[in-house]
């Protein structure tokens, strides 16, 4: 029988980065066997707070107590010894190794010589009681995001974690997968075997699975309570503390124009040389948002990379208004073609260059940024950056900081300002643009996408968030196994059909 | 803070390297302090030693650029020695072919031939990496050996001057077809090439749209592709420019120092150029300063042997130790800030508890 979960108490935690107080005097008490949510906007200090609990960061003030005794600060090992474990937003599994190897590898007391036979017996015994099953022999690289998330959680359970912190675990999962994973954890909590601290900004998950909630706003405590005594409106008010920025942009009725962006029998390989995109034909017209729904790993990534010029197509081609499109600067400009790829820091920014420089990546070789034919006008880059940072509320507002130091939401804002600022976008391709962002940022991005569409641009939106597509797309395709297998509109959409198509049973 | 770091860390690394080298000298039976005094005297102690230093600095300036220019585009080039050698061979071949022409024409032809040879040499290695996935470090290293073998083949075969008996060499350039010296010194005009090349390189990487494009591709290829930059072309051009500099260093060695092509082309300036580039953190202006420093070290090699009875290779040991410490120091950038943070955190915590 597992030990009961510990009581965790954080008192007056503060954490300062540079001049910024990211967490300011926050206290938190988690009784054993509770499912607690930590709500807050992007940059509210949720991740920093739990990293202080985990000992990844050392708090500048305050103390963490486990069952009443203060925990030695700044040591993840110590936290692990107390049975505190965390599943991070980004996977920490080793892709080239198998599930079994990853699980065994995580053991802190790994012997020099591993008795694999014994380990496998232990693993199988462990899996018998585990809520979801994974194939021990499969390589992590071949698993879908949802399966990887499950392995991460299994790993924590295998390490006998009794207090589990989850940092936005469902952002990579389909709704069904999210419900399955959280439902399972809920049952463990109810059985008194586990406490869970869930970082999220999805009210649905809080309402459905959590007992109590703590809300942070700008690093400070903004409210707490039992979920049964709260409703989403009250929690939103705590999180925001002010009126949401700007008014929602209304979608003007669709007035579909001429075909603009067209993909012709596009085929592409994945990194392992297997065909991942099996001849996709697709047309996006003026003034419409076409959504591509699907579970990650069904060729979206490769398709997007081909469109963005980051991967060569094995055959097929792309046209804009019937003209061949290639990812060269001249054609990108001529076709007014812009892309918002997923993971903006990895795909659309140069982390060690400044925010202002990153904002200038599309324009630096045009006057006034270019002088005398080849010289770079640094002053105009700085000025342009300052304008964009203000217009798109990038924080912190200093243009000379490396963009890699910004939070995810602010990197996305900086990239948005670059891709959408010109106001002359004709083709916009976006992939999971709201991944991991809070709802304020999500609204902001959706508004920009709709605005762009209303101005007559063709928008292709690839998203793993079906709700997002149903909300803003005009037409939706479902991608499965590298093919577009289903077409519908938000009005006619049948969720059961879409779900089946996404799952590949068609 | 950042600025202070970029000065403190290299100097700290050099200081640490010098301490270790001092221990080495002490073990070899020499007084480290006297060794350093000799190094200083031989490198910078007099006008005469300054001249020696500058003569050695000129190929270093150009070989340093050979690594630091492609580094801007994110490619590590270590084929400097090979580029220098083929540049020298190109120069002597062009020079011998145009001996009947006026000296200025001959020298310009030599320079162009050297830059083309060196440039194509490195561009090839960089293109292999970009288009075929062969690491430029590996291909550069192997191409070095190839260049040296090619040189031996030429100077012992088709280009050989029959009168060069023990030390095979090509036919010599006539004295008026060689690079001139600053009057009253033995410093040749080659140093000007190096200084000008560094200044041009600085403007290129720091002040032009081309340099900005290089920085983007070097910083994140995927982003460069997204915004439509011709990444392949950019890195190959950067490789060509770097190689052209090393090739020009070969031309200087041929046209100013040796007056002919021989084994002395392969004197190690290319390898030391890698050290220069890393010491200067790939900055062309840094190359300008570091080349003179390292030139002084090279100039003082003989002195160590004469004055302290240390082996000839001692100066290579010093270079090796310095290189190690410089590479190591690259890993500590940004750490001092974190360290300071943790310390202040401990204090705040102590107060709170």
Image: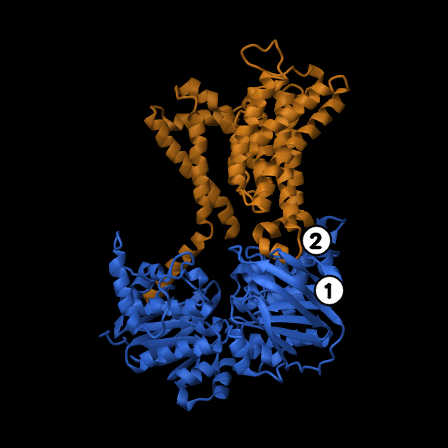
Chain colours: A blue, B orange
Q: Is residue A129 above or below residue B303?
A: below
Tag 1 subunit: A
Asked whether A167 or A483 is in front, the reply is A483
Whether tag 2 and tag 1 are in contact, CB under 8 A, the answer is no
* Residue count near mark 2 (Cα–Cα under 10 Å), binned few <14, some 14–19, many ≥20: some
Asked whether B271 or A390 is in front, the reply is B271
- Give x and y (percent) for residue A36: 37, 80
Element under label 2?
A: loop
The number of discs equals 2
Residue A358 visible from this viewpoint: yes
- Give x and y (percent) for residue A334: 75, 61
Asked whether A307 or A472 is in front, the reply is A307
- Give x and y (percent) for residue B211: 65, 47
Residue A361 visible from this viewpoint: no
Q: Is residue A419 above or below residue B55?
A: below
Residue B264 occupies quadrant: top right
Residue position marked by numbered label 2 in the rendering: A377
Q: Quadrant of the N terminus of chain A?
A: bottom left
Residue A307 occupies quadrant: bottom right
Residue position marked by numbered label 1 in the rendering: A320
- Give x and y (percent) for residue A379: 68, 56
Left or right position of A81 against A17: left
Element under label 1?
A: strand
Asked whether A127 or A411 is in front, the reply is A127
Q: Quadrant of the C terminus of chain A?
A: bottom right
């Amino acid at each position: 029988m597992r030990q009961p979960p510990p009581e965790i108490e954080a008192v007056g935690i503060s954490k300062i980065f540079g001049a910024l107080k990211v967490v300011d005097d926050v206290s938190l008490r988690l009784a054993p066997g509770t499912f607690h949510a930590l709500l807050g906007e992007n940059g509210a200090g949720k991740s920093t707070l739990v990293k202080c609990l985990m000992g990844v960061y050392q708090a500048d003030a305050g103390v963490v107590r486990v069952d009443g005794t203060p925990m030695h600060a700044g040591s993840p090992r110590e936290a692990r010894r107390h049975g505190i474990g965390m599943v991070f937003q980004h996977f920490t599994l080793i892709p080239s190794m198998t599930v079994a190897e990853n699980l065994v590898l995580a053991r802190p007391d790994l012997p020099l010589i591993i008795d694999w036979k014994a380990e496998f017996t232990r693993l199988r015994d462990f899996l018998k009681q585990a809520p979801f099953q994974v194939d021990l022999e499969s390589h992590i690289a071949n698993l879908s995001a949802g399966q990887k998330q499950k392995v991460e959680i299994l790993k924590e359970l295998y390490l006998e974690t009794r207090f589990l912190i989850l940092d936005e675990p469902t952002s990579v999962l389909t709704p069904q997968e999210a419900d399955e994973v959280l439902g399972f954890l809920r049952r463990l909590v109810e059985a008194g075997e586990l406490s869970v601290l869930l970082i999220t900004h999805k009210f649905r998950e809080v309402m459905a699975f959590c007992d109590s909630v703590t809300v942070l706003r700008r690093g400070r405590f903004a409210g707490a309570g039992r979920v049964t005594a709260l409703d989403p409106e009250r929690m939103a008010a705590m999180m925001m503390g002010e009126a949401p920025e700007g008014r929602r942009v209304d979608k003007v009725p669709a007035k579909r124009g001429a075909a603009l962006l067209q993909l012709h029998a596009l085929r592409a390989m994945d990194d392992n040389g297997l065909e991942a995109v099996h001849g996709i034909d697709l047309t996006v017209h003026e003034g419409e948002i076409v959504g591509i729904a699907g579970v990650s790993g069904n060729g979206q990534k490769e398709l997007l990379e081909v469109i963005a010029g980051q991967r060569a197509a094995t055959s097929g081609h792309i046209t804009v208004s019937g003209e061949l499109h290639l990812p060269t600067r001249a054609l990108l400009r001529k076709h007014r073609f812009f892309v918002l790829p997923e993971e903006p820091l990895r795909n659309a920014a140069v982390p060690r260059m400044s925010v202002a420089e990153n904002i200038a990546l599309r324009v630096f070789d045009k006057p006034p940024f270019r002088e005398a034919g080849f010289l770079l006008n640094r002053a105009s880059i700085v000025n342009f950056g300052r304008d964009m940072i203000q217009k798109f509320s990038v924080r912190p507002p200093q243009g000379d900081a490396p963009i890699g130091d910004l939070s995810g939401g602010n990197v996305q804002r900086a990239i948005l300002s670059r891709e959408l600022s010109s106001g002359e976008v004709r083709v916009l391709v976006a992939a999971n643009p709201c991944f991991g962002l809070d709802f304020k940022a999500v609204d902001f991005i959706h508004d920009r996408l709709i605005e762009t569409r209303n101005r007559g641009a063709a928008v292709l939106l690839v998203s793993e968030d079906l709700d997002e597509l149903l909300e803003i797309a005009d037409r939706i395709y479902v991608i499965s196994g590298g093919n577009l297998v289903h077409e519908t509109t938000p009005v006619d959409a049948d969720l059961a059909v879409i779900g089946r198509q996404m799952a590949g049973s068609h | 803070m950042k600025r202070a770091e970029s000065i403190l860390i290299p100097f700290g690394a050099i200081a640490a390297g010098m301490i270790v080298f001092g221990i080495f000298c002490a073990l070899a039976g020499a007084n480290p302090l006297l060794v350093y005094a000799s190094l200083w005297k031989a490198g910078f102690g007099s006008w005469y030693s300054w001249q020696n230093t500058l003569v050695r600095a000129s190929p270093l300036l150009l070989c340093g650029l050979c690594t630091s220019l492609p580094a801007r585009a994110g490619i590590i080039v270590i084929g400097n020695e090979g580029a220098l050698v083929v540049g020298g061979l190109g120069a002597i071949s062009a020079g011998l072919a145009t001996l009947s022409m006026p000296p200025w024409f001959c020298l310009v032809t030599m320079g162009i031939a050297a830059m083309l040879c060196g440039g194509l040499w490195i561009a090839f290695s960089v293109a292999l990496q970009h288009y075929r996935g062969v690491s430029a470090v590996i291909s550069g290293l192997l191409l070095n050996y190839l260049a040296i073998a090619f040189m031996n083949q030429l100077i012992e075969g088709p280009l050989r001057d029959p009168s060069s008996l023990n030390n095979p060499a090509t036919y010599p350039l006539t004295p008026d077809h060689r690079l001139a010296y600053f009057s009253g010194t033995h410093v040749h005009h080659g140093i000007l090439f190096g200084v000008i090349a560094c200044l041009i390189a600085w403007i290129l990487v720091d002040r032009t749209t081309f340099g900005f494009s290089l920085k983007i591709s070097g910083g994140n290829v995927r982003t460069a592709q997204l915004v439509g930059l011709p990444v392949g072309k950019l890195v190959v051009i950067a490789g060509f420019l770097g190689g052209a500099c090393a090739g020009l260093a070969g031309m200087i060695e041929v046209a100013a120092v040796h007056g002919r092509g021989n084994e002395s082309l392969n004197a190690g300036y290319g390898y030391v150029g890698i050290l220069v580039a890393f010491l200067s953190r790939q900055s062309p202006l840094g190359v300008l300063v570091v080349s003179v420093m390292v030139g002084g070290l090279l100039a003082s090699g003989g002195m160590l042997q004469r004055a302290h009875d240390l082996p000839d290779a001692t100066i290579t040991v010093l270079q090796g130790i310095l290189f190690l410490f410089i590479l190591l120091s690259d890993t500590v950038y940004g750490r001092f800030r974190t360290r300071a943070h943790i310390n202040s955190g401990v204090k705040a915590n102590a107060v709170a508890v």
